[in-house]
Structures are given as C-alpha cells and as structure tokens.
Image (cartoon, helix red, strand yellow):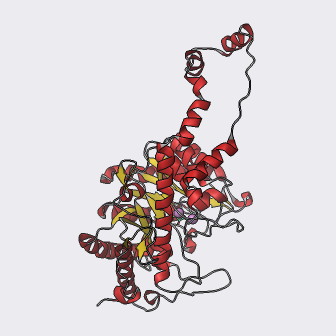
Amino acid sequence: MTAQVSFFGDLEPLTFGGSDAPTPSSFRWYDKDRIVAGKRLEDHLRFAVCYWHSFCWPGGDPFGGETFLRPWHHGSDALGLAKQKADVAFELFRLLDVPYFTFHDVDAAPEGATLRESIYNLDVIAGVFEEKMASAKVRLLWGTANLFSNRRYMAGAATNPDPDVFAYAAGQVRAALETTHRLGGQNYVLWGGREGYETLLNTDMKRELDQLGRFVSMVVEHKHKIGFQGPILIEPKPKEPTKHQYDFDVATCYGFLERYGLTKDVKLNLEQNHAILAGHSFQHEIALAQALGVFGSLDINRGDDLLGWDTDQFAMNVPEMALCFHELLNGGGFTTGGLNFDAKIRRQSIAPDDLVIAHAGSMDACARAFIAAADMLEARALTGFVADRYAGWEQPEAQAMLSGQRSLAEVADRALSQDLNPQPRSGRQEYLEALVNRFV
Ligand code: XLS
Ligand code: NI
Ligand code: NI
C-alpha cells in the first residue's frame, strides 16, 4: 500500500490489553473507555502527538548530525516530502488511537523563499490535513507558528529591534492562527522562543516587553475578528534559547498578562521540563496557574535530573505525574487543553516503532498516574488534610479579617484583648508522603 504502512511495518492500532499485556502491541493501563472520576479516560487525558519532535527532528545533537534518516527528510520536492510526512504522521495518530495532534507552521509545510510562498505551502498542507481528518478520528489540539528557528528571528520575533521582523512574524501568526481555525483547532499557542535577550548591553527591555504586549494583543484581536473560539496560550520557559526569557514561569507570565490586560483571552500552556528549568516542580506550576485562573493546557514530557537543559524526554515517572494530575483534577481538569507530547525519542532510538513505543509507554504511565490521582482525590487523602489544616479560616471572625471588614488595628486589638497565644501544629509531611505511596 502507501508509504505509511511500510514505515511502521505491520503494526496494528494499539488497543487496551490489561496489565499483563505484551508491550508494545497493547496498552496496559490506558483503557480509553474506562470511567474515572465521572468521565472516560480519553476525555480526561486528551492526548496529542506533536509534529515537530516526532516527524521533523532528525536526531542531531550539538556534536553529531542526523541519526534517524527519515525518508521524508531526503529529496528535492519539498511539498511532496511534506505530504509523505503527513502520511506517516496520520498513520502514527491512527496506530496510537490519539484524539489530537499539534504542529508549527514550518513542521507541516516547507518554508518558501518568501512569506507569501510559505503561506501558500501551509495552505496546501492544510488541505491535505483537512482531507485526512475527514476520515480520521484525530482532531487538532493546537496550532502554532515557529518564530524562532529562522535566522531572521535571532534577535526575537515580536521583541526584535527591527519592526519589519515584527511584521513578518505577524504574517506568519495570522496564517497559522487562521489555519488552526480552519482545521477546528481547540487552542492557539505562542511560545516566545526568542522573546528574551542575551545581554542588556544591546537591549531595551521595557521597549521589548511593550512590543510583546502589543503583539499578543493583536493576536487576541484577530482571534475575535475571525471568530476563533479557543484561548490563546502562551508557554512559560525560563531560558533556552535566550538567557533571559520574558515568559520565565507562571508567575512571570501572569504579571505580563495582567500588565497588558490579557488575562481574559490568554491562558498558559505549561511544560514539565520548562517548570524544572525555572526551578519549580510541574505540580507547582499547574497549581499556581489554576490558582491565578490562567490554566490552559499541558506539554507533557520530562527533563533529566542531571542535565540543565530542555531534554524533552517522554514522561514515564508515575508517582511524580500522579501528584501533577491530582492538582489538575482537583482544579477541574482540562476544558480546551490536553496532554501534548512535546517529547522526543533519544537519538539512538532509530527504529521506526520506537516512536510508537515511546508514546504508548508514556500514555500508559499517564493513565496509571491519572487513575492513582483520581483515587487519591476520591478518598480525599490530601484534600481532606489540607481542608482541616485551614479550617480555622472558615470561622466568622477569620472570614471578616479576609473580606476587608477589619482593619489592621482592629485585628491587632483583638489579638491583645483575647490574649491570643496560638500553638503550632504538625505539618505531617512524612505522614502525607507515605499516604501518597499507598495510591501510587
Ligand atoms: C520548546 C517549546 C515548544 C513549544 C511550541 O521548548 O516547548 O516546543 O511547545 O513552540
Ligand atoms: Ni512545549
Ligand atoms: Ni520545551
């Protein structure tokens, strides 16, 4: 038959086979129809396969070039190769039975010699996607534009000192947003890959932040103009490629969105490895984004404990993820977001089915972690303890302090008149850690 069948050999679509099922031909934990916390697992987890790491990255590192030798990376007919790549991509989506995928403009379609030509190419491939999606299950979780690889963006896209670069980026984003809309995308992502700086010796930071604020506002205005329903998502990352990224972490992004009046339309796409680079846990970033009302979606992957960069490995650590999913579920789970595998196989994983095994293994790990999280939540193992810990704040006098009905002097006077002498209580961390281990 076609190229896609021969690329993955004779693999059949994966199905749930139970915990003793042989890998990689079955899922052991990801039973998509299992009802967990009131919903099918598939509808909770909303897995997406990303285009860039799986089908575009050739397996290079700073010391060595391509290891994968994908057939669609070699040849001169750029659009033909992009179509071949789409065949393989949709074959992987089918084998994994995933509900979503994600892509950058330049992952899907070759960059042309001009902006106009690039937009034409994207349009052609969007047509190919549309045709494939008509008979496939897979839907688009989000689209995005790559505003960081081309050398024109070396000093930033929206934050570039040259306004023509800002305009060029607007050209790419308009096309990518409209393509995302055309394909029924649920969100649109802006990762500020080059929106940061290397040295203040050549940088006007205030000006660059204002440029970025205006750029994101323009994207929001355009989203409304074309009737795109989903949120715009920005993606925090503290460093790499630039030394100082303007979208450092959740707290920094929230400050940025507040300053430019964007919190209503823009939410956050959080990534595990980025959280670690920022000196946080993923769990912390999820909980904070939810607390601030800007939670959007997740890029699921894993950093390496010993390496200080964005290794983007497939997430496999069940106990760690269980705590993240506990936050996710406790905050109500996804609405338009999902779990996007912003993850790449290692450069020695050169067999075609390594792509299948990596995704399936991580889907299983996520499912297992999610089930543990749902059990923990149902038992109120952690939430019950936390509610008790703060129970004093439910008392009328405490509520009055919080709601602005008491001044500092009134509160202070009460502490004196009642001769308050509060006694510390144990935080019971080890008790709780041991409790978590009963579920994972
Ligand atoms: C890179 C980012 C990127 C975004 C999409 O570190 O994670 O892959 O998710 O541009
Ligand atoms: Ni990402
Ligand atoms: Ni990343």
In this figure, what is the number of numbered marks? Answer: 0
- In the image, is 46 to the left or to the right of 263? left
Quarter-of-image position of residue 171:
bottom left
The structure residue drawn at horizontal position 57% and vertical position 74%, both measured from the top left corner, is: 151
Camera sees residue 209: no
Q: Is residue 294 above or below residue 212?
A: above
Image quadrant containing the C terminus? bottom right
Ligand 3: image quarter: bottom right
The structure residue drawn at horizontal position 52% and vertical position 79%, both measured from the top left corner, is: 57
Quarter-of-image position of residue 48:
bottom left
- In the image, is 425 to the left or to the right of 67? right
Camera-side residue of 136 and 28: 28
The structure residue drawn at horizontal position 47% and vertical position 49%, both measured from the top left corner, is: 374
Quarter-of-image position of residue 411:
top right
How far across and how far down the image is residue 37, in percent? 40, 48
- In the image, is 202 to the left or to the right of 392? right
